[in-house]
Amino acid sequence: MNKKPKVAIVKGEFPFSTSDIDAMVGRAVGLLGGLTKRIKKGDHVVIKPNLFAPYPPPVSVDRRVIASVVRLARQAGAERVTVIEGVSVGTLMKRVNPSLSAHGMVRGFSTIDVMGMLGVKKAVEEAGGEVVGVEDTKKVVVDIKGGKALHRVNYPKAVLDADYFINIPAMKTHTMTMVTLSIKNLQGLLDEKGRYFSHRDDLDQHMVDISKIRKPDLVILDGLIGMEGMGAGEGGSPVEMGIIMAGDDPVAVDAIASMCMGVDNPLVVGTTRIAAHDGLGIANPFLIEVIGNTVSEVRKKFQLPINFTQPIESIVTGVYPNIDLYIGGACPTCWLMTALMESALAKVPQRFSLIVGVDPKVPPKISTDLEHTFFLGECALSTGGDLREIRNEMQLKGIDRFLGGCPPYEQALVKIEEILIQMGYLKEEDLIKKAQEHKKKFFDYYRLQDSTWEPES
Ligand code: SF4
């Protein structure tokens, strides 16, 4: 009979010092037998944390957890420890850089920018490791055996070649995958194009397929400060969990972690369910051995993203008085993107038409002029009939209100903001101010948690 996978949970008390965190990480790994039996002298260990955006926990993994794992790996005999990450596409392409706001609106942060700003680079180097951004590292083309949504990707060679691979996810909710834990965390290993275009309605399967390239040897989950609500970025709020988890089976870790977040049935999480189906691990909690603390000792009920608690229609159709929405034949990603586009347009005191999906039914004459008519997504941009006539007229008149792409993701959000700025409805200063507010929210919160933190501005 197969042995049950073990998942360790170690709970501590706030506030956490670096030595508290070292002790918790050490205990979680120790409950599984320790790293010295797993890492050989001279090994190259590669660590993939979740550094989602230029904000500290709960948006990104605590640098002290990463440094703690680097130290453990070195103590176990690793000759080289590399911390590799690729920040979210929103961070690469869309997030406004408030520290450069004196030079106008600057968008985007590289992974190395984020590692520097958050103090990850310093902490890792002091612990005896090195940091690498996925954008900057050598990648190789990999055919994914058993891939269903992803078949061929550019993948970091360092991860493929690693003697030992450790995944350090955060514990967060996510508007597209409900939660983001260890399986979702590997998305950051894809190149920029792969990261961008995996954000479709088959995102869960994409995430599972990445694990088929190189399954982590160990997961150490940073559950010190979790995130609830409209995660995984600015829309989320901290939940003080105070736990570190560890396990060899990423599916089992995700199943138990989601239960700690108050999800009663871990199989409702797509990445967990599909990963178990595809043979990557065990999701059935009755077949998992939880060691250390129990789920009931640490469980908190995280507020899930609104689109997982009520029908998506309730936040998209019939919501904004100034928006005439024509949506039909759209897949879930475009429904979610429509919600984001509408929230941008709703702030403007003008009437807009928004056209989304495959052949949505539009009246012979739409209610707005062409300047105030937006097309969202590749489907709306390629449907014939009446929609083509409207688009043709817009093109002849040089009116570009086409928010294309499949999915119409971060670039579409950037473009709508740029169009609203050109139209005079939005100011660059507003976006800079909003970015400064987001930064302040997370920086102020985390400073209270860790007085030793010295971020680069
Ligand atoms: S463009 Fe079409 S296929 Fe692509 S995400 Fe939107 S509705 Fe789905």
Image (cartoon, rainbow, N blue to C red):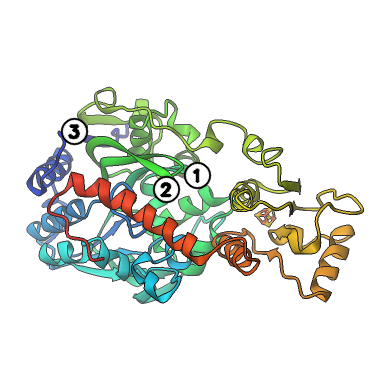
Secondary element type, mark 1: loop
Answer whether residue 430 is visible to the viewer in this image.
yes
Drawn side of residue 308 relative to residue 68, left or right: right
Q: Which residue: 27% across, 41% down? A: 225
Measured along the vertical axis of the image, is residue 229 above or below residue 149? above
Q: Amino acid at mark 3?
A: Lys
Q: How far across and how far down the image is residue 323, in percent? A: 71, 47
Q: How far across and how far down the image is residue 196, in percent? A: 52, 63
- For the image, the number of numbered tags is 3
Secondary element type, mark 3: strand
Q: Amino acid at mark 2?
A: Ala
Residue 47 quadrant:
bottom left
The one of 89 and 1 positioned closer to us in this rendering = 89
State yes or no: discs 3 and 2 in contact (Cβ < 8 Å): no
Drawn side of residue 97 relative to residue 247, left or right: right
State yes or no: discs 2 and 1 in contact (Cβ < 8 Å): yes
Q: Mark on residue 11?
A: 3
Q: Mark on residue 232?
A: 2
Q: Amino acid at mark 1?
A: Thr
Answer whether residue 144 is visible to the viewer in this image.
no
Q: Residue furthest top?
A: 296
Give the distance between the C-alpha atoms of the residues marked 3 and 2, in whole angstroms: 23 Å
Measured along the vertical axis of the image, is residue 134 above or below residue 218? below
Secondary element type, mark 2: loop
Give the distance between the C-alpha atoms of the residues marked 1 and 3, in whole angstroms: 27 Å
The reply to whether the residue tagged 2 has its Cβ within 8 angstroms of ligand 1 is no
The one of 29 and 60 positioned closer to us in this rendering = 60
Instruction: Give the residue at mark 1.
Output: 175
Which mark sits nearer the N-terminus, 3 or 2? 3
- Classify 10 Å Cα crowding around label 3: few (below 14), some (14-19), many (20 and above): many
